[in-house]
C-alpha cells in the first residue's frame, strides 16, 4: 500500500470541499436521483440546452471529468482515491452507454476518456479486493433505475 503525501491528501480534501459547494451539491443530488438516459437524443429531449437539469448534468460531468484528469496524471494517491471515492464510478456508469454516440458526434475519441480510464482502473482495483462487487453494483444500479422508471410511469 502506498503512502500518500500531505500534498495529495490536501488535494483530496480540496476536491471534497469543492463537492460541498451548494450549487454543485444540488446538481449532484439531482443527477443521482434523475439522470438515467440511454442516448444523446433522449438526453436533449428530456433535458434541453439551457434547462436547469442540463446545467446540473454538465456541472456533475465536468467536475468528475476534471477529477479523473487529475487522477490519471498521478497527482493523487490512487489507493486513497479509490478507497474514498465511489461517486465518480456511478457518474461513468450513467454515461457509459452515451459515450460512443457522443464520441462520434464530436468526432473525438476523447469524450469522457478521463472518466473511462479512471473507472477502468477503479474496477480492476475493486475486483482485486472484492471479486464480483462491480457486477453486484451494476445490478443494484439497474434495479434502482427500473424502480425509478416504474414510479415515474405510474405518476
Image (tube, helix red, strand yellow):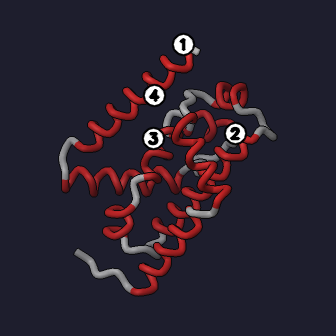
State the image quarter where residue 104 is shown: top right
First of labels 4, 2 by sequence position:
2
Q: Residue at x 41, y 86 (%)?
A: 6
Q: Looking at the image, can residue 141 be seen?
A: yes
Please identify the quadrant where the C terminus is shown: top right
Mark 2 → mark 1, Cα distance in angstroms = 22 Å
Q: Secondary structure at mark 2?
A: helix
Eye-nearest disc, 4 or 3: 4
First of labels 4, 3 by sequence position:
3
Q: Nearest the camera: 39 or 21?
A: 21
Eye-nearest disc, 1 or 3: 1
Q: Residue beneath label 3, please?
A: 93
Q: Is residue 62 left or right of residue 134?
A: right
Q: Secondary structure at mark 4?
A: helix
Eye-nearest disc, 2 or 1: 1
Mark 3 → mark 2, Cα distance in angstroms = 19 Å
Task: Specify the farthest residue to the bottom.
Answer: 6
Q: Residue at x 63, y 49 (%)?
A: 27
Task: Specify the farthest residue to the front.
Answer: 155
First of labels 1, 3 by sequence position:
3
Residue 76: percent from left, percent from top:
43, 74
Residue 25: percent from left, percent from top:
59, 55
Compared with 5, 81 (above or below) is: above
Q: Which mark is residue 145?
A: 4
Q: Residue beneath label 1, please?
A: 154
Q: Secondary structure at mark 3?
A: helix
Q: Secondary structure at mark 1?
A: helix
Q: Residue beneath label 2, please?
A: 53
First of labels 1, 4 by sequence position:
4
Amino acid at each position: 500500500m502506498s503512502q500518500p503525501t500531505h500534498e495529495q491528501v490536501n488535494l483530496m480534501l480540496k476536491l471534497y470541499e469543492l463537492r460541498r459547494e451548494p450549487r454543485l451539491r444540488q446538481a449532484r443530488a439531482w443527477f443521482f436521483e434523475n439522470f438515467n438516459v440511454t442516448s444523446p437524443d433522449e438526453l436533449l429531449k428530456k433535458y434541453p440546452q439551457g434547462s436547469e437539469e442540463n446545467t446540473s448534468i454538465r456541472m456533475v460531468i465536468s467536475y468528475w471529468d476534471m477529477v479523473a484528469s487529475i487522477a490519471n496524471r498521478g497527482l493523487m494517491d490512487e489507493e486513497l482515491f479509490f478507497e474514498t471515492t465511489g461517486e465518480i464510478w456511478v457518474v461513468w456508469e450513467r454515461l457509459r452507454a452515451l459515450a460512443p454516440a457522443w464520441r462520434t458526434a464530436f468526432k473525438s475519441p476523447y469524450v469522457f476518456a478521463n472518466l473511462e480510464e479512471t473507472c477502468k482502473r477503479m474496477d480492476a482495483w475493486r475486483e482485486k479486493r472484492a471479486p464480483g462487487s462491480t457486477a453486484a453494483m451494476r445490478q443494484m444500479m439497474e434495479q434502482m433505475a427500473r424502480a425509478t422508471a416504474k414510479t415515474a410511469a405510474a405518476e
